[in-house]
Every structure is written in C-alpha cells, then in structure tokens.
Amino acid sequence: MRQNVYEYAYELKRERQHRNTSMFIVIVSVIVCLSLFFSFILFPVLVKSDSMESDIARGGAVFVSPFVHTPKRGDVVFISRSDNEKAAGLARPIDLLLRFFTAQKIQLHTSGRITAKPCLRRVLALPGDTIYMKDYVLYVKPEGQKQYLTEFELASRPYTVHIYSVPVEWDGLGSCGTISERTIGRNEYFVLADNRIEGTDSRVWGNIPSSRIGGKVVLQYFPFNKIRLF
C-alpha cells in the first residue's frame, strides 16, 4: 500500500519540530543549570595582574565560592565591582559561560572604570580590629585584646608576601609601606595584595564593606601544574 506523500511530509515535519523543541529545551536547561551553579556554587576568576604573587601568578585561574561572605584572616577573597554593575537578563548566563570556557579571557560585560574592576585580595583585619603597618608588614590587635601580633601570626594559613627594595628614584610611586594606627569599622575588612609594592588595596581604597566580598577562593585550577586548594 502506497503512503500518501502529504502524510509522509507531515510526519517528517512533526518529527523535525519535536527534535528542535527537545534540543531547545536541553540547551536552555544547560544554560540555566550552569548559571545557577556559577551564581551559587562556584564561579571562575582569571587573575590579570601580579598583585597576588607568589600564591597566584598573572594568568592563573581560580574558583571562588560565593557562600563565604564572612572570611577569616588570611583568606583570599573576590572583591566585586565597586559600582555593583552586572550583566542583566540572558546576557548574564551567556557571559558566565564565555568566562568559564575561555578562563575569563572573553566576556560580554566589561567596564572601563579602574575602580570598578573586580579583583582578588587577602583579608588581614576583621571588623573591630586595630591595625598599623610598618615596613609593609601589618600589625593587628584583634578586638578585645591588648597585644599587637603580626599578620602572619594571626592568619588562618601560611602565605608569602612579595616585598623588594624600591630604588630611591621611585619615591612616591607604588603603595606605601607604613600606615598609622586605625580601627576597622563594623561590617568592614582590611585587605592587602601579596605584592605589597605594586599592588593596590585597602591602603589606597580604604576598608572594604562586607557587601563587596563576593566569595572566597577555594581552588586554583590553572595552570595545571599549580592546582591546589586554598
């Protein structure tokens, strides 16, 4: 019995529509799942400066957990944009996918404002702490205590800072190595770059409000020979 050509064409069209609909649902589901994962579980960050050497070199990529908004001393945290500007709508999940699969080298949403750029810095003083700096080393008196201790004695884990002699003709350049005594306000943190000479941090910006701490670095996944947990 010969099949009617119109019925055959209709069946093909219906199968094609069903296949296209299924593919669309799968793609949307993947984008939604990845967007939720990157927003609430982990998101990748590419380090574009030498500020966190020698722990994280320029070109390194790390995963940040947005769960951590109350860091410990010594934690490396992601500091969000100062203007809180974010990609909106469908552009956000697409931007997240591009950032992930290109290790942050390609992104839809950028800003020309230097002060707005997100970055990684190390938390060294908590709300209520009193601090001062001498020779690029931070001294901290935790709230309720009477004695100052160095940042290294109070940190939750060991780390290395990058300090070198600055030529005399560089006077006035770079971040300062001395700051006077001050107390950190409520819901604020004092953060420093590991590269104390070239990095900018709370010595320039002032204390960082807790609302700008977007999470804690938990894993460096690139370069592959330097994979490690934080």
Image (spheres, helix red, strand yellow):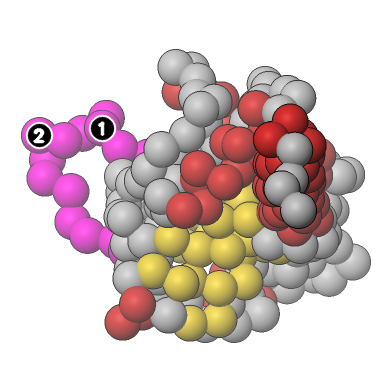
**230 with respect to 104 (left or right):** right
Where disc 1 sits, the SS reads loop
Q: Position of residue 153 (x, y in %)?
A: 60, 81
From this view, report whether residue 158 is shown above or below residue 132.
below
Q: Name the amino acid type tagged 2.
A: Glu
Residue 68: % across, % down: 79, 62
Image coordinates for residue 213, horizontal then vertical, percent: 72, 47
Determine the residue positioned at 60% across, 43% down.
96
Relative height, residue 132 to residue 207 (above, below): below
Q: Which residues fall within the magenta stretch?
A: 162-175
Estimate how packed mark 2 is, as few (under 14), some (14 to 19) or many (20 or more) residues with alpha carbons within 10 Å: few
Indicate the amino acid at tag 1.
Leu
Quadrant in the picture for the C terminus: bottom right
> Residue 169 bears which disc, if any?
2
Which residue is at the front of the view, 144 or 109?
Answer: 109
- Depicted 171 relative to depicted 155: above or below: above
**Residue at (57%, 46%) from the top-left corner?**
97
Disc 1 designates what residue?
173
In the displayed image of the protein, which residue is found farthest to the front?
1
The answer to whether 137 is drawn above or below residue 147 in the figure is above
Instruction: Please identify, in this view, whether the residue under mark 2 or under mark 1 is nearer the observer.
Output: 1
Label 2 element class:
helix
Residue 197 appears left or right of 97: left
Give the main secondary structure, helix, strand or loop, of the magenta stretch: loop
Q: Verify whether residue 171 appears in magenta.
A: yes
Q: Which mark is residue 135?
A: none
How far, Cα to Cα, is label 2 from label 1? 9 Å
Q: Position of residue 228 (x, y in %)?
A: 48, 82
